[in-house]
C-alpha cells in the first residue's frame, strides 16, 4: 500500500494514470476500504487529505479484471472509409491571426469546397475538389488574384489510400495543357508588375507537379479533411501526426461519447508540452467514415507573439 497526500487539481483519473491503474473506480474502492470515515471519498478528491493507493502488484491484479471503460468496443471503433458515390459541399472558414501585448489582429477567409468521389482503383480512392464562393476580409488585389488563381485550377484531384489518408494532390491533364490560356487570362485581369511576379511563381508551382503536390498537402482543407482519422484505436485512443507550419505535431484522439449511433464525434489534442497547442473535434458518419464537420484550433508562440488559427468546415449538402 502507498500513502499519498492529495495535491490541488489531482483526480482519481490522473492518479490512476500515474500508477498505471486502468480503471479509476478501483482507486476509490481501495481507499474507501482502508480509510477512516473522515477520509472517505464520495465524489471528488480533497487536497491535503491522505489517499491510500495500491502498490504495483495490487495494480496488476486490478488490471487483470480487464474492465476499464476505455477498453469498451464503442471507444475503440474500427472506422471504415466507404466513399463510393459520395458527393458533398462544405462551408469552410479559416481565421488566422496574432496576439501581442493584449492586442489581436486577424483575418477570415471563407469558401465552399465541393468534394466528389470519382473512382476507386486498386487500393486508392480518387476525388475531385472544387473551391468556389470565396470571401476574404483583406479586399486587396493580391487576395483577389490568389482566389482567381485557385479557382482556375478546379478541380483538384485528391488521391487517398483505403483509410482516407491523402497520398497526393494533382491536376487534370487538360488543366496543365491549357495553362498558357489560364496565365494569359490572369495577366489580363491583373495587369501590374506585382501580379506578374505572383503569376510567374504560380506557373512554376503548377507546372512542377512534385512541387504542386508538396504545397497543396499544406492546404488547410485538404490536410485536415484527409487526416489520419481512422487509425486503429488502442485503450480508447488512436494516434497520428499532423504537419503544422514547419512542425510535425503528434495528435491523440478519442471518442467523445460512448452512446453514438449514426454519427461519431472524435476529440483531438496535442500532447502536453508540445510546441504547438492543437485541439480538434470531428463528426463522422459511423457507417461510411465520411467526415460531416470539423473544428480545429492551434496556436504557437514565438518571441512574445502568439499566432493562432481557427479552421472549420461544415456539410451544406
Image (tube, grey):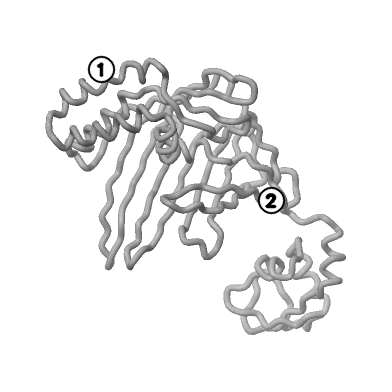
Q: Residue at x 73, y 70 (%)?
A: 19
The secondary element bearing badge 1 is classed as helix
The secondary element bearing badge 2 is classed as loop
Q: Residue at x 25, y 62 (%)?
A: 103
Q: Is residue 82 left or right of residue 53?
A: left
Q: Residues within 10 Å of mark 2 (few under 14, many from 20)?
A: some
Location of residue 4 in the rendering, given as x and y in whole percent from the top left corner: 71, 81
Q: Is residue 174 left or right of residue 253?
A: left
The quarter of the rendered structure image containing the C terminus is top left
Location of residue 214 in the rendering, given as x and y in whole percent from the top left corner: 44, 38
Q: Which mark is residue 273?
A: none
Q: Residues within 10 Å of mark 1 (few under 14, many from 20)?
A: few
Q: Residue at x 21, y 25 (%)?
A: 186
Q: Which residue is mark 2?
A: 236
Q: In which quarter of the view is residue 104 placed?
A: bottom left
In the image, residue 53 above or below residue 106: below
Q: In which quarter of the view is residue 76 placed?
A: top right
Q: In which quarter of the view is residue 100 placed?
A: bottom left
Location of residue 72 in the rendering, given as x and y in whole percent from the top left corner: 75, 48
Give the number of the mark in front: 1 or 2.
1
Location of residue 116 in the rendering, given as x and y in whole percent from the top left corner: 48, 22
Please give the count of numbered marks on the rendered protein.
2
In space, the residues marked 1 and 2 are separated at their CA atoms by: 53 Å
Q: Is residue 245 visible?
A: yes
Q: Which residue is mark 1?
A: 181
In the image, residue 51 above or below residue 262: below
Q: Residues at badges 1 and 2 in contact (C-beta under 8 Å)?
A: no
Q: Is residue 317 visible?
A: no
- Between discs 1 and 2, the one toward the N terminus: 1
In the image, residue 195 above or below residue 99: above
Amino acid at each position: 500500500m502507498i500513502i499519498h497526500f492529495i495535491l490541488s487539481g489531482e483526480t482519481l483519473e490522473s492518479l490512476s494514470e500515474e500508477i498505471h491503474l486502468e480503471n479509476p473506480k478501483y482507486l476509490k474502492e481501495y481507499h474507501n476500504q482502508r480509510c477512516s470515515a473522515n477520509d472517505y471519498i464520495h465524489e471528488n478528491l480533497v487536497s491535503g487529505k491522505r489517499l491510500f493507493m495500491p502498490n504495483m502488484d495490487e495494480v496488476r491484479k486490478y488490471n487483470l479484471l480487464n474492465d476499464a471503460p476505455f477498453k469498451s468496443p464503442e471507444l475503440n471503433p474500427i472506422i471504415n472509409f466507404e466513399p463510393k458515390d459520395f458527393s458533398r459541399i462544405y462551408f469552410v472558414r479559416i481565421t488566422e491571426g496574432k496576439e501581442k501585448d493584449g492586442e489581436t489582429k486577424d483575418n477570415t477567409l471563407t469558401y465552399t469546397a465541393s468534394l466528389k468521389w470519382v473512382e476507386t482503383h486498386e487500393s486508392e480512392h480518387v476525388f475531385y475538389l472544387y473551391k468556389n464562393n470565396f470571401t476574404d476580409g483583406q479586399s486587396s488585389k493580391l487576395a483577389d488574384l490568389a482566389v482567381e488563381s485557385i479557382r482556375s485550377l478546379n478541380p483538384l484531384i485528391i488521391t487517398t489510400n483505403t483509410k482516407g489518408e491523402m497520398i497526393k494532390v494533382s491536376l487534370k491533364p487538360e488543366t496543365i495543357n491549357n495553362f498558357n490560356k489560364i496565365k494569359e487570362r490572369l495577366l489580363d485581369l491583373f495587369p501590374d508588375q506585382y501580379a506578374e511576379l505572383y503569376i510567374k511563381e504560380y506557373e512554376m508551382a503548377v507546372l512542377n507537379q512534385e512541387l504542386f503536390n508538396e504545397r497543396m498537402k499544406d492546404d488547410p482543407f485538404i490536410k485536415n479533411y484527409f487526416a489520419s482519422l481512422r487509425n486503429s484505436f488502442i485503450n480508447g485512443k488512436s494516434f497520428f501526426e499532423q504537419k503544422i507550419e514547419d512542425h510535425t505535431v503528434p495528435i491523440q484522439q478519442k471518442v467523445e461519447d460512448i452512446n453514438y449511433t449514426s454519427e461519431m464525434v472524435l476529440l483531438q489534442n496535442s500532447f502536453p508540452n508540445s510546441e504547438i497547442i492543437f485541439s480538434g473535434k470531428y463528426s463522422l458518419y459511423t457507417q461510411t467514415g465520411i467526415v460531416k464537420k470539423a473544428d480545429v484550433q492551434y496556436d504557437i508562440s514565438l518571441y512574445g507573439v502568439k499566432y493562432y488559427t481557427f479552421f472549420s468546415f461544415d456539410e451544406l449538402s
